Image: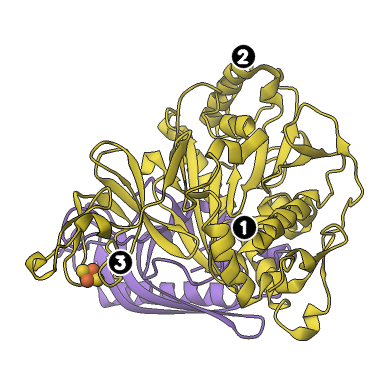
Chain colours: A yellow, B purple
Amino acid sequence: MTMQRAHALLTDDAGEIDRRVFSDPDLFQMEMGKIFNKTWLFVGHESQIPQVGDFIQSRMGVDSVIVTRDREGTIRVLLNTCRHRGMKVCRYDEGNTRLFYCPYHAWTYDLSGRLVNLPHAENYESFDKARWSLKQAPHVTSFRGFIWATWDEAAQPFEEYLGDLRQPLWDGLGPWDGGDGEVEIISGTLKWIVPCNWKIIAENFAGDPLHEPSHASVNRVRLGPGGRRDPLGKLFLTHFPTGHGFVVEQFDPSVDRGFYAASPATAEYHRISMQKRYARLGERAGTPLVLGTVFPNAAIHTSQPRTLMVAHPLTADKTEMWRMFFVDKDAPQEVKDYLRRYYMAYGGPGGMTEQDDMENWTYAFQATLSDNCRTLPFNYGAALKMQPLDTQIAGTVSAELMSEQNTRNYYKVWAACMDKD
Amino acid sequence: MSESNSNPDRMLTMELEREIQQFLFDEADAVDSRQFERWLEFFAEDLRYWIPLRKNMPGKGKHPDVGGDRDAAWIDDDMETLRKRVAQILTGVHWAEEPPSRVVHLVTNIRIKPIQDSADHHVFSNIIVHRNRLETESDLIVARREDKIRRAGGLLKIYRRTIYLNHHTLTAKNLSFFV
Ligand code: FES
Ligand SMILES: [Fe+2]
């Protein structure tokens, strides 16, 4: 394996990408070490584990992890494998507990992952329990309630990893009114398996405005007056040196846009919230994120709908998608109910928007498997020579919306991770 | 998934039992033969068509293994959304169903209970839904189903459909077909 192996698969400034990037099992194995064991990964939200003893089962790359709130209230991310002989110590999706009891030989761990009990302890010579804790992510952080973890002891802090994305993402993950309140995950995570490589999914959300034809049918049927949503302002693509890519919109925040007209209660709540948001954030309220991917695999829609997707890799040819929806914690119940149903009609395997994405990803992926198909690179060349726009919007902004700059950047960062020693 | 709100005192006539069974078989036939406009006629305007998530929870205890009323679900449609799904398929550019999938519903284990203090019926069934798409892409969905059915203007209508999938993590890449 040469030092520049991954970079060699990107040509013409990543305007052309070798199809093996999506299907080579060796590259996939490398990704697990060089990307999923190195970068920050989304694992859950604080609203899913509000009390001491609460836990959820989550994933980091191919691994099952448990996200807990321990007796000190600290959030822990534990590798879900018994230190004795590997059995999963937690097989419930969620709950509240004091201990994780391994069903194989009964080694038992506390909420911080410490081994607290094992049968026949007297038969081990000078057994040091402290050496046999569950493996724990060395860095865990909560960013406005959204929990991220990394396996890399030497990882840069999460906010540095976000870079200039920090402020717009902070604004995007808070309540509509721009205040210090919270959002909450609507209980329940949609989990389903898509037969394609995880990056085909992640790159799509990083900013692929050219894939609009995928959604012709939902736009025609109209989930909202603008097609599948309310009409958006002027759109831009922006990307960041650590691989994140987002779509940003620009509009006049002093003017009410009349969103959510189909639900008067939601429309009213939104209108009042947006007024407060403008009062608090000023012009920043007029350039919110719409959607994007936090490298490598967490895709967030921050405006409409409000939802978070993680593309968990299973094998080079299989991905487990997880999707959850979030709303303002303090929104009236009627508003939460309306938004929940709208979000679900939009996204997830039953979502009228996302269904068509899965069809395209599945069959595009199939054509990365044969030697014959692999002689043909994928094309990411839209607006290849575009000059970045000078604007207040954070990141490197494309003057041309119909550009593949975000996806090119995504793969350049992917290659840099892969070629790093 | 309880059947306790039935009234054992109200007897079902054989004719009614046959009629409701026939109604469910006709409904399955309408959707499987892609007569979607006809299929919509089987549902009432106040419909809730709900497919909750399934969860891995302790078998003992008070935690349901089914997503709650206000939780995220696979599908939670009213009549308006269901009509949009049909309209989406009929656009001809709904790529997930174009070319069309082939879908077959098997409806079995039908049990009919009168709903107390009303003329409506609670109908329990088990379903197997098979989808084949393009060449070999195939999905098999197995579920327990509960329908609430009433008679309106002489016609039977489903006003509440709940489908408890037997699946936790879906292995179907999408639910662009009607379960
Ligand atoms: S594998 Fe867990 S106790 Fe043996
Ligand atoms: Fe899409």
- Closer to us: B52 or B47: B52
In what quadrant of the picture does the C terminus of chain A appear?
bottom right
- Distance, label 3 to label 2, CA atoms, is 50 Å
The residue at the far top in this view is A279
- Mark 1 lies within 8 Å of ligand 2 (Cβ measured): yes
- Distance, label 3 to label 1, CA atoms, is 32 Å
Q: Position of residue A89 (x, y in %)?
A: 27, 63
Q: Residue at x 60, y 74 (%)?
A: A317
- Closer to us: A206 or B166: A206
Give yes or no for contact between labels 2 and 1 (Cβ–Cβ under 8 Å): no
Q: Amino acid at mark 3?
A: Lys
Answer yes or no: is residue A302 visible: no
- Closer to us: A344 or A405: A405
Q: Residues within 10 Å of mark 1 (few under 14, many from 20)?
A: many
Q: Residue at x 50, y 49 (%)?
A: A42
As helix, strand or loop, the secondary structure at mark 2 comes to helix
Give yes or no for contact between labels 3 and 2 (Cβ–Cβ under 8 Å): no
Give the label, 2 or 1, closer to the camera: 2
Q: Amino acid at mark 2?
A: Ala
- Distance, label 2 to label 1, CA atoms, is 35 Å
Which quadrant would residue B134 be assigned to in this image? bottom right
Answer yes or no: is residue A186 visible: yes
Residue A401, numbered circle: none
Q: Position of residue B95 (x, y in %)?
A: 70, 67
Location of mark 2 (residue): A279
Location of mark 3 (residue): A88
Which quadrant would residue A291 be assigned to in this image? top right
Q: Amino acid at mark 1?
A: Glu
Q: Is residue B178 above or below residue A390?
A: below
Q: Earlier in the sequence, mark 3 or mark 1?
A: 3
Q: Earlier in the sequence, mark 3 or mark 2?
A: 3
